[in-house]
Image: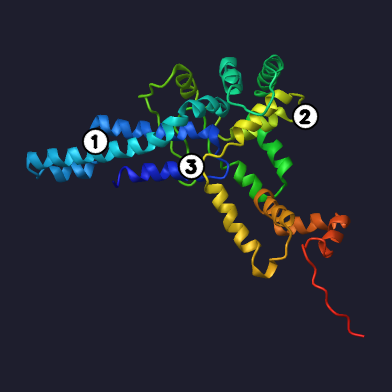
């Protein structure tokens, strides 16, 4: 358990990060399952366990090995019970986690369209838009210090200039396809897993992993689609990146709302609560930067001072 549970916790933390979406889920879960199955096939349960077993009778060793296998089998079955039902879907959308856009094949993009509901996507226009973005990526990836620097500059300019933003951009996690992941909660580690036997597409993605290792796929797509007239591709990108990988982020929002909408502020309107939550979760300005920003918005300051933000204003009797 000391060797297996950290792997499970590692995957769990990755799933709970606020920027982890359904695009990343297939890679995280498949990577975890692969590690567990490798440990099961190799029959390796830890160096310390092997040393302790040298003094055990053979029968007891066999019984312990059997219990270890049952434990790992149980963990794998539990994960697959919930994952296999949607595996095809998450494997399909994981193609948009690929950071080398020019390597994405059209057939996989077309496959993703079959999962989009309540949205009309013109495949002919989508094909032209997709080829245009691939061409744009090829033209830009070797210019201005590389695509990595361009994406970071774009995200910084659109998220504010605080130190928090710059540090968060430079300290990201690469999650794509069916490859190993790098956890920004721990020290960076790189693992090469040769026992990779999924479909050919995932194999190709795996061979190209870590080529670009400092930007996020959603940031890359936002950069490439900026100021482009690609409505069909934008619908598809918005769809796949809006799918959460876990409910961790929503639980995080609920905890924020608990302190924001308390007994002392119970008369706040719903739209005001939503607006404050959006500011809390999306802005990266420091208090000082946000204060300076408000001073440049007289209309906003006037609304802040007004009582319109409350659903009911108590009538205080005037004293003559």
State the SS at label 2.
loop
Q: Residue 272, located in which quarter of the rendered image?
A: bottom right
- Against 108, residue 219 (above or below) is below
Which class describes the residues within 10 Å of circle 3: few (<14), some (14-19), or many (20+)? many
Which class describes the residues within 10 Å of circle 1: few (<14), some (14-19), or many (20+)? some
Disc 1 or 3, which lies upstream in sequence? 3
Left or right placement of residue 211 versus residue 269 in this view: left
Task: Using the rendered image of the protein, determine whether residue 298 is visible from the camera's viewpoint.
Answer: yes
Residue 52 x %, y %: 15, 46
Disc 3 or 2, which lies upstream in sequence? 3
Left or right placement of residue 214 versus residue 266 in this view: left
Tell me whether circle 1 and circle 2 mark residues in contact (CB < 8 Å). no
- Against 117, residue 274 (above or below) is below
Left or right placement of residue 62 versus residue 105 in this view: left
Q: Distance between the residues labelled 1 and 2?
A: 53 Å
Residue 75 x %, y %: 32, 39
Residue 283 x %, y %: 69, 50
Q: How far apart are marks 3 and 2 (CA)?
A: 31 Å
State the SS at label 1.
loop
Which class describes the residues within 10 Å of circle 2: few (<14), some (14-19), or many (20+)? few
- Against 303, residue 107 (above or below) is above
Task: Residue under label 2, please give it.
Answer: 227
Task: Residue under label 3, please give it.
Answer: 14
Q: Residue at x 61, y 36 (%)?
A: 242
Q: Report the front residue among 164 and 91.
A: 91
State the SS at label 3.
helix
Task: Residue under label 1, please give it.
Answer: 44
Q: Report the front residue among 126 and 135.
A: 126
Q: Report the front residue among 284 and 305.
A: 305
Disc 1 or 2, which lies upstream in sequence? 1
Residue 144 x %, y %: 70, 28
């Amino acid at each position: 358990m000391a060797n297996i549970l950290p792997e499970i916790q590692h995957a769990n933390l990755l799933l709970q990060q606020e920027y982890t979406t359904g695009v990343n889920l297939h890679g995280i879960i498949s990577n975890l399952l692969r590690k567990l199955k490798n440990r099961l096939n190799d029959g390796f349960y830890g160096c310390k366990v092997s040393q302790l077993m040298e003094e055990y009778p053979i029968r007891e060793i066999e019984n312990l090995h059997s219990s270890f296998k049952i434990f790992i089998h149980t963990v794998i079955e539990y994960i697959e019970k919930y994952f296999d039902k949607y595996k095809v879907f998450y494997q399909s959308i994981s193609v948009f986690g690929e950071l080398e856009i020019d390597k994405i094949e059209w057939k996989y993009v077309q496959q993703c369209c079959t999962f989009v509901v309540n949205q009309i996507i013109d495949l002919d226009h989508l094909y032209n838009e997709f080829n245009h973005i691939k061409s744009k990526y090829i033209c830009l990836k070797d210019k201005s210090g590389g695509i990595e620097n361009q994406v970071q500059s774009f995200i910084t300019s659109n998220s504010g200039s605080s130190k928090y933003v710059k540090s968060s951009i430079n300290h990201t996690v690469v999650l794509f396809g069916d490859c190993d992941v790098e956890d920004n909660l721990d020290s960076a580690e790189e693992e090469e897993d040769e026992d990779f036997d999924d479909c050919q597409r995932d194999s190709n993605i795996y061979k190209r992993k870590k080529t670009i290792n400092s930007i996020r796929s959603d940031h890359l797509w936002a950069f490439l689609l900026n100021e482009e007239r690609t409505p069909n591709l934008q619908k598809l990108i918005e769809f796949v990146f809006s799918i959460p990988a876990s409910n961790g982020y929503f639980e995080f929002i609920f905890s924020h709302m608990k302190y924001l909408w308390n007994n002392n502020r119970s008369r706040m309107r719903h739209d005001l609560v939503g607006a404050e939550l959006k500011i809390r979760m999306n802005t990266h300005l420091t208090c000082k930067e946000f204060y300076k920003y408000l001073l440049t918005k007289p209309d906003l300051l006037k609304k802040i001072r007004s009582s319109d933000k409350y659903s009911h204003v108590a009538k205080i009797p005037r004293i003559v």
